[in-house]
Image (cartoon, rainbow, N blue to C red):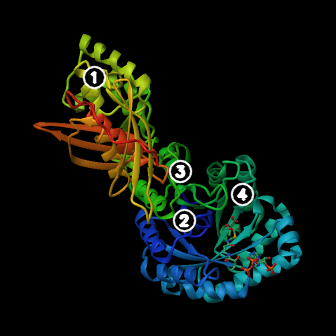
Amino acid sequence: MSDRIYIFDTTLRDGEQSPGCSMNIDEKIRVAHALAALGVDIIEAGFPIASPGDFEAVHRIASEVHGPCIAGLARAAEGDIRRAAEAIKPAGDHGRIHTFIATSPIHMEAKLRMTPDQVLERAVASVKLARSLVPEVEFSAEDAGRTDMDFLCRVVEATIAAGARVINIPDTVGYMTPAEFGGRIRELIERVPNSDQAIISVHCHNDLGLAVANSLAAVENGARQVECTINGLGERAGNAALEEIVMILRTRADRYALHTDIDTTKIVPTSKLVSQITGMPIQANKAIVGANAFAHESGIHQDGVLKHQKTYEIMTPESVGLNTNRMVLGKHSGRAALKSRYGQLGVELDGERLIEVFNRFKLLADKKKDIFDEDLMALLSGDGGVESERVKLVSLHTASGTSDAPVAAVVLDIEGVEHKATAEGDGPVDAAFKAIQSLVEPNGKLLLYAVNAITAGTDAQGEVTVRLQNGDRIVNGQGSDTDIIVASARALIAALNKLPDMHARSVHAQYSGV
Ligand SMILES: CC(=O)SCCNC(=O)CCNC(=O)[C@H](O)C(C)(C)COP(=O)(O)OP(=O)(O)OC[C@H]1O[C@@H](n2cnc3c(N)ncnc32)[C@H](O)[C@@H]1OP(=O)(O)O
Ligand SMILES: CC(C)C(=O)C(=O)O
């Protein structure tokens, strides 16, 4: 049996079936090019009968994207199959019709309202029709996980005999467990007399969180094509995540001795592209591509990684397309990581001095979630960070829109006394800055305002950097929050706190609320 695993990417078909993840034609083409560069073997580009736009997307991908085989999905219905054949035509020999029909009792009775014999007959007729139109045909027995094994064997044998070169066994509703699914694949291969004439494929859903485990169990038992999606996108809880399948096979080559043709260094860029285009954020602790997948905050882990990366990293960040791992300084960090970060900032700390700064760092980390380099530099001068804040943000309300001028109302605690102001501005950030700056003096001249998303998605943690000048003094401030306006206000206040002699202005604007 071959040691090659074919990666069938269905991000543009099943992935797109995730609620809210529809892509337009240009977006699909961008993703298809990225998938080709990633090295997938088959791109399922869409379901051509579904809409004129999906037909056009499949047709254009088949014309413009070279390298992978381009597949179009079709029900076991003549209209679907002819439409799919037309859509993939520009791909020539690199085109595949993927036709399917459900074989489980519940799907046949309740949904299709067909008898098993009718389904078998339709499956065979569909594969024959597809084979008369294109050389490469894949057949899927939808809901194979819940299909009677004898019937599944009959369907698989008949569709191979009808000309299907790939037989896909989907666990459509993510019901299988790994041992059960692996056993099913092994039994099929053993019982179906012509199974050696087709590649056995699997397509697992993640309803019970087992899509990747079930796919691997299938591979261990002889499946040689895995259907998967970038970031595990897909109907309901999604499909098996491509990045996980590929990196498991690579990282545990000792166990599987199987390989794919994926250029793993393109995994993270492709994942980001798909997330950006679909608007589906990647959870921070998502395996391989999550923001925390190569980040360490705990001191014991940081110390280990600094001594030898393999203590806590089973893959290198570079192998998936990241530049480096990430050491996050926080309340769980230890001296090794702190010393290392200072070293990167050009400050060598050792012995008593390191212990002294480290103790101050722990006090600060107990109060402050994000420790920035600015905070570290402040700690060196004995400045405890939040403890020495003369100005604190009590509340901020902004209102903006297409018709009214943006306005901000702010309440600051300045050396223990609350001060309030409102201001209008060119945007909500400008209004907030004007309100804050109206309450203190000196209030500095804004030299830089920069926003950086720390995590991806619309719920991203935003980090803002503000640089202020007062006379010949230049200070930076940073702030973070999921609300970018609040992050901006925090950054401005952090910078103001670094201006010597900054204090409450004696007369301030009237607070009116917004
Ligand atoms: C497991 C999967 O992921 S399968 C892929 C699921 N993806 C999608 O459904 C996305 C694209 N779908 C669509 O755009 C539409 O559903 C269309 C264009 C395919 C069909 O639309 P409509 O003709 O309005 O049918 P509708 O969606 O309401 O119902 C599906 C019909 O297909 C039939 N059907 C379902 N699967 C199959 C199949 N594999 N082979 C043949 N017929 C099928 C159903 O029995 C039903 O037939 P009925 O109308 O005679 O009862
Ligand atoms: C069309 C088939 C392969 C499918 O998406 C499923 O069964 O989940």
In this view of the protein, which residue sits in the foreground, 27 or 359? 359
| Element carrying mark 2 | strand
Instruction: Provide the residue designation for mark 2.
Output: 9
Q: Which of marks 2 and 3 is nearer the N terminus?
A: 2
| Element carrying mark 4 | helix
Q: Which of marks 1 and 2 is nearer the N terminus?
A: 2
Q: Residues within 10 Å of mark 4 (few under 14, many from 20)?
A: many
**C-alpha gap between disc 1 and disc 3:** 41 Å
Residue type at numbered disc 1: Leu
Q: Give the number of the mark in front: 1 or 2.
A: 1
Instruction: Provide the residue designation for mark 4.
Output: 185
Q: Give the number of the mark in front: 2 or 4.
A: 2
**C-alpha gap between disc 3 and disc 4:** 21 Å
Residue type at numbered disc 2: Asp
In this view of the protein, which residue sits in the foreground, 319 or 434? 434
Q: Which of marks 2 and 4 is nearer the N terminus?
A: 2
Question: Looking at the picture, does residue 265 appear above or below residue 121?
Answer: above
**C-alpha gap between disc 2 and disc 4:** 20 Å
In this view of the protein, which residue sits in the foreground, 417 or 393? 417
